[in-house]
Structures are given as structure tokens and as C-alpha cells.
Amino acid sequence: MTKEALTKEFEAIVGADNVLTSETDRHTYSYDAAVLDSVMPALVVRPTTSEQLGKVTALCNENGLPLTVRGAGTNLSGGTIPHPGGVVVLTNGMSNILEINEEDMYAVVEPGVVTSKFAAAVAAKGLFYPPDPGSQTVSTIGGNVAENAGGLRGLKYGVTKDYVMGVDFWDVNGELIKTGSRTVKCVTGYNLAGLMVASEGTLGVFDKIILKLVPPPQAAKSMMAIFPSMKAASETVAAIIANKIVPATLEMMDNFTIRTVDNFRKAGLPTDAAALLLIEVDGHPAQVEDEAAKVEDICKQNGCTEIKVANDAAERDAVWQARRDALPALANLKPTCVLEDATVPRSQIPNMIAALEDISNKYDLTIGTFGHAGDGNLHPTILTDKRNEKEWERVEEAIEAIFERALAMGGTLSGEHGIGMAKSKFMIDETSKGTLEYARRMKSVLDPKGILNPGKIIG
Amino acid sequence: MADINKLAQMLKELDDQLVNCMRCGMCQAVCPLFKETGREFDVARGKLALLDGLASEMIKDPEGVNERLNRCLLCGTCAANCPSGVKVSDIFLKGRAIMTGYLGLSPVKKAIFKGMLANPKLFDTLLSFGSKFQGLFTKEADALLGSSCARFNAPVIGDRHFKGLAKKPFHKIIPEMDTQPRGDAPRVAIFTGCAIDKIFPSVGEAAVKALQHHGCGIFLPKGQACCGIPVISSGDRETFDKLVRTNLEVYKNAEFDYLLTSCATCTATIKELWSDMYGGYAGDKLDIERIAEKTMDISQFLVDVMGVEPSEVNGGDVTYHDPCHLRNSLKITAQPRTLLKASKGCSLKEMPEAASCCGCGGSFNLNHYELSQKIGNRKADNIQASGAKTVATSCPACMLQITDMLSQRQAGVGVKHVIELYADGLPR
């Protein structure tokens, strides 16, 4: 079929307004948030109903057109960068919350629902949807599931996969595949919903997602602990967990990040501190009091020089504002900001911190480190200018070195940003030849023409 | 038309600023236009990518990019919330100037900008004719708001309920002033602004009344020109320079402590764009910076300099809309609210999303009325949700847009400038 004829076919399904063909418009769907080159799609299609989405998927398959689903395009590993000549399928025309069931504590949503809007709608009903990825004010639930997005609350509440009860998706033939259920327990058939989580759009096109909801914690207490060394801070993290306390959030910042954040907002952070831990415990009020006191003790026993406990909402907000400022503040320093998310078992945090220092020195790069220390998911952030080719080469080498060290510690390539295109060539280092072949065989049967987000995860 | 290679070279000037966008996409959360359309080319990230694409010759469709670039309210909400601190509005204005240099100005804009706006006297004369004859084409739509709509199907007016030209513009009511302060009160210069002069002269009168009440000496000169925002947002650098120059001549040799405007857009333009975008005689830079430093929003002046404080006497509910050019460009949100609380007979009642754009965006309203209306209707919903019978704001452009939206739905809500409400409560 010619491109004109194909365009007509897509227009017949979704309406002319929802097919973008001009070079200018297509260019704005050629990238995501990863530091990778743009790839121009042939068409951009925006279905507004479930039926249209199924038909679009089938039409792509019939014509062997690569199909990349895109929510907010905030992916950090190139998962939403299209394949050359492919079709970008937008989900923001399907952004309805179909049901929030308070009795059975679940919700059913379309893939284009924005995460924070969903969380707010759930909160309005007195329930809680914990996953809170950094991009939650724009990211979509479809993208969160496809990437298994994490966030600050991962330590205690888990990540997106822990809330996915079911996914209805379109296969390449335009058949609606139903998986999971609205019940807590369900062993009906293969756990296909689980297979969809972190599949990065390579196995099916999400139509509806069933999400688990939980009761919100009744109380919370936040504190900021100041340490004379990253080592003391990371040992404190290990000690808190060893004492059987699981804070809702347990975040760390290195001195470089502290200074940058303070310079950014003049929030009066201790700029001479080597490390900060930002901690929040939540739950029943009595438990919160008890755990907060224990955490305070543990911090002090591990060399904490000062601990500030937030006494009201404003002080609590100030603690978390500092953490929210970390990435923007770092990003302001240099034109290019490479945000990594290699993750290690949390007992290895002290070793990982030391490794990052080595790497920063060896490759002569500025690396700010902050992140989810409690779950071993640090965000070493390399500040550079991609136009400086010499430095960029060193950045690429440093990234490889970070992966190598993380894997050697029993860690993983990506805690929450996905493999996409950026990390697919490193998959073999963490898994095995056999693992990749198994995955490729599965994909080749489910998607014989290889149209579903080609080039991602398994290359 | 020059060749596209040359355009790419010209856009390279923006490279150092464009590269700061890390494509995180967080602007999608705050862009009022994206909220309505959901299209990437409507949000800052998309537009920055388009400029970058054109500069690096990845795409070769300057007309297409220009059209997308102009589909923007220039409200600056994205820049105010950008994690990487990208100066989005600055890039867009420079981008528009480069694109206009390359593609040329539309004949209509050329006629209006160069033929009329650049020549304040002619502009005034033409509009005074307009004021006399507008009744032939329009009829009253809402008595409370003083709005009008078209008598018959007229181009440009369309479905708009607009605030007509005032019978007597401000510069006819008070042609000029040059008074000394009482005691140690400061002496202030007033920059009237086109919309206040020609459509809302009562705002100008209220400002004078309030300043006199506080004992300020007033310098209100003749011969003021437009601040330049309509022309620079259309990329017309030449006319912009001319207008800035005209205004400099009027103000630069006068003695005053502050330059005040009651128009958020004029304030932001004088404070930020005059120095950023002026391409005329380099020797003018010092004068521009000196004036920019002295420029203040009227409520900011009354609260921060004159120390106006909230009063105990409350009255009817008034809600406040944050003009983008005060909130996003100048970070002024508290002072207008304080001034309202200080106004006799007013109680401030916040509306939901007070900070979101009203959808006017100057010429955006003319070129994309349907979208402008959608955004404006959301604002009108929020105003009504507050339950207040009056909405106050600090920018005549917002007043025009909000008047249109409220008049169309006969909401029974009045639109006032903050300074009008404050002046109303002052003794005569």
C-alpha cells in the first residue's frame, strides 16, 4: 500500500484529526527523555476508543508497520523512540478512569491516564495508589506498567508491578487478550498480566489496566539526618533495615547534590555535610512515633551529626522539596544530564558509592549522586555537554563502568528506567545467551512480523 | 526568501539555549494549550525540538515550524516550572524574530505594526474614529460588564463579546501630569499602556487617584508609545526597536523614583524584554536597564514601597486571577492579593487554578480563537466556582478575555482591575 493509501486507512479508523502526517508534526514524536538520537516516524496516530486501538494495531500488523506506543514520552532509555518508518500510537486520547472500586479496593483505567491525576482521584475516595515515579505529573499508567516504574516509595510499598492485577491488551492480530482479574487471588492460566509488566510495548498494546489500591497510612513523620561521610550515611541505611524498620522512603544525597540543591533554592541545607538521609516513616500513629524514635537513635549511633525532625506539614514539605529539587538543580548546571539507575542489593550501597567515586575520578566527570538508598536504587547523574565529543566518549565509558560494577555486586542494569534502546546491548551481561534467546523466541511467536516496538529490550 | 541553509545558520544562535532542554517533558503538566489539545507540538518540549530540528536541518519546513511556534500563549508557565530552567519564552521570541526575518511579516501585520502602532499619534487618531463608529457594528451584550457583540456577522469579531473602545481614551481624560510629592513620598512615572488608554481608561484614573491618595508626585508624559509586546511576539524586531526608542525619549530624561504600570504585560515587557530583545543603538542599553530597574507593577509598588496592609473591614467576595506576566515572568502573586484585602468592601475568595492562563495570549486570541475560548472557559468555570461576584486581576488583556468569556455565558460576574477596587474604597 502507498503511504497515502495507508494514511487514508488510519484516518478511516481514528478520524483525520487524529492522524499526523506532516514532517513538522511527526518530528515532535521522534524523541523521548533519553539522551539518544531522534528517529522520525512515518505516521502518528491517536486512537480515542478501545475499538480504534485494536484496529490500529491490526492494521499496522497487516502492513508490517513497526508500532511504538507513546504516553507522555518521558522514557529515559529510549523506549518510546519510534522505529524508522514506523507508526507512533498515542494513548492520551484514552485517558479515562473507568472505575474506582472502594469496596474491593481496585481501579480500572485506560492506558493514557496520568499517574498523579489517578493517584489524586484514588486519594479523593480515601484510598492510596503508592507508585510515585519522578515524572508522575505527566507520565501515564500505561507507560508506568510497560516500564514497571518505581519511585520514592519503592522500599516499603513496592513498585508498579506490585499493583497490577490485570491487563487487557491487543495482540498483533487485533484480538483482545484478557488477563488477571479484579480479585486478590487469581490463578487462571499463565500470569500474562505479569508478562506485560516491563514489556516496554514489545508484546502487546495495553487497552485497560486493573490496579490494586491500598488504605492510606494514618500518620507519617519525616526527618533529615546529616552525616560526615557517605560511608556513615550508607551504613545507617543498612542499620535501619537490619533493625526491621522499613521506612516509606529512605533517600540519600551526596555533598555535590546538597550544594547544588541549596544553590538552586537557597533552602538553608547544610552545605558542608558529606551526605544527607531523608527519611519518612508512616503507618499507625503509635508505630510512627516508635519507629521515628528508633530511626533517630540509629542515625546517632552511626555518626549522624544532626537530625531535624519535621514538626508540621510545612517542615515536612521542606524536607521533600529538597529531594524533588535534586534532579532539576543538577540539570541546571550543564546542558546534558545523564540520569542512570543501575541498582544494587541495598547492603551494597556503601560499595556502590565508593565505586561511583572511583568512576567519577577515573573518567574525570562530574557525577552527582542521590536516590533511593533504601532500595539500592541510586541515581548517579552525569553532568556533561553532549556537544563535547571527547567528554561524551568518557561519559559512555563511565556508564559501562557503572553497569559493570553494579552487576559485579549482584545488582541490575536498571531499577526503574527500563532497558529500551539505551541498555539493550548490556542485557547479555546481566542475563545469559540462553535467556535472551528464550525471550526472542517468545517474541517471534507472539509478534511474528516483529512490529511491536522493535529494537527495544532484546535488540 | 533566503535559502533554508541560511535559516539554519540563523537558528544556531539559539543553540546554547536549546541544548538546555533535556526533553524531560515536565512542561506537559502545566501548559494550558497542551491541556486542551494533547499534541506534543503545542507544548514547549515539542516547539524547542522543532527549532532544534530546523537548526540542525533534520526538518525542512520553516512555514510549518513557524505556524506551530506561533501557536503559543507566551504565558511562560512552562519556563516558570522547567526543571532545567530553560528560558522558553525568550527562545520563542528570538525564534519568532528569526522566522519572521526569514519568512517576512504577513501583510496585515505589516500594515498594523509599521503603519499604525509605530506611529502613536496616528494610532490614537484612527482609534478615536473607531470609538465613535463602533456602535454601528456592535450592540450591548452584558450591561454589567459593558461588553458588546457583533450586530451582524462581522469578520474578526465573530462570536466575541468584547469590551469596546472607550468613548474617551485615558490620554484625553488626563493628557499629562507633572506633580511633586507630598512630604517624603516618592515621585513616580506612569506608563499607561495601550489597552488601559483605549479600552479601560478607568484603570488609569484609579491608579492616579490611588497614587495621589498616597501623596506620590506623578509624572505622566504625553507621547507614550506601545510597550512593543504585540510586535515582538510577531517577530517584528524593527518596529519593536522603534517603539522602545520612542518610549525612551519620553522617559529617560525625566526624574522619578519608580516607573509604574497597571498592565502586567507592559510591566514584564519593560522589565525583561526591552533589554533582552532591543537591537537598536547600543548606547541605549544603559537607559533601558535603568528604567527596567525602576519599573514596577502598581500593586507591588503600593504594598512593597508604600506599605499598604490588609484592612479589617471586609465586604463582598472578590476572586483574583493571576496574570501570567505577573506570576510567571515577575513572580508577583502576593501583592495584588494584599491590595485586594486592603480594599474597602472586598473580601478575597480564591478560585481553583487562579494561576492558570486565561487563554488570551494577545494575538493568540485573534489567530486561534477556538482554542483561546476553550482555555478561557475553563477560567470562567473556575471564577464561577469561587462564588465571587467580582473577579479582579492586574492585566487589561486578561480583563478583555475574561469579560468575553463571562459575558457569553451571562455569568453575572463583574471584571475589575485590582487598582480600581482599591481606589473605589479610598476617600474622594
Image: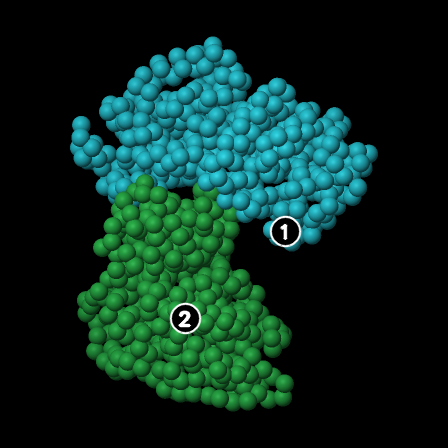
Label 1 neighbour load within 10 Å: few <14, some 14-19, many 20+: some
Which residue occupies the foreground of this view, B132 or A212?
Answer: B132
Identify the residue shown where x is 55% and y is 89%.
B180
Please name the residue that numbered disc 2 is placed on: B281
User: Can you give x and y, in whole percent of width and height, for residue B114 in the image?
Assistant: 28, 71
- Looking at the rendered image, the quarter that the C terminus of chain A falls into is top left
Residue B317: assigned label: none
Tell me what hue chain B is rendered in: green
User: Can you give x and y, in whole percent of width and height, for residue A23 in the image?
Assistant: 27, 41
Task: Report the residue that reaches farthest toward the top.
Answer: A434
User: Can residue A212 be spotted in the picture?
Assistant: no
Q: Chain of mark 2?
A: B
Secondary element at tag 2: loop
Secondary element at tag 1: helix
Quadrant of the rendered image containing residue B307: bottom right
Colour mode of the rendering: by chain
Please name the residue that numbered disc 1 is placed on: A263
Quadrant of the rendered image containing residue A63: top left
Q: Left of A289 or right of it: where is B209?
A: left
Label 2 neighbour load within 10 Å: few <14, some 14-19, many 20+: few
Query: In the displayed structure, would residue A100 be above or below residue A146?
Result: below
Identify the residue shown where x is 44% and y is 12%.
A438
Type of the residue with mark 2: Tyr
User: Can you give x and y, in whole percent of width and height, for residue A300 in the image?
Assistant: 81, 37
Q: Left of A442 or right of it: where is A359?
A: right
Q: Chain of mark 1?
A: A
Tell me what hue chain A is rendered in: cyan
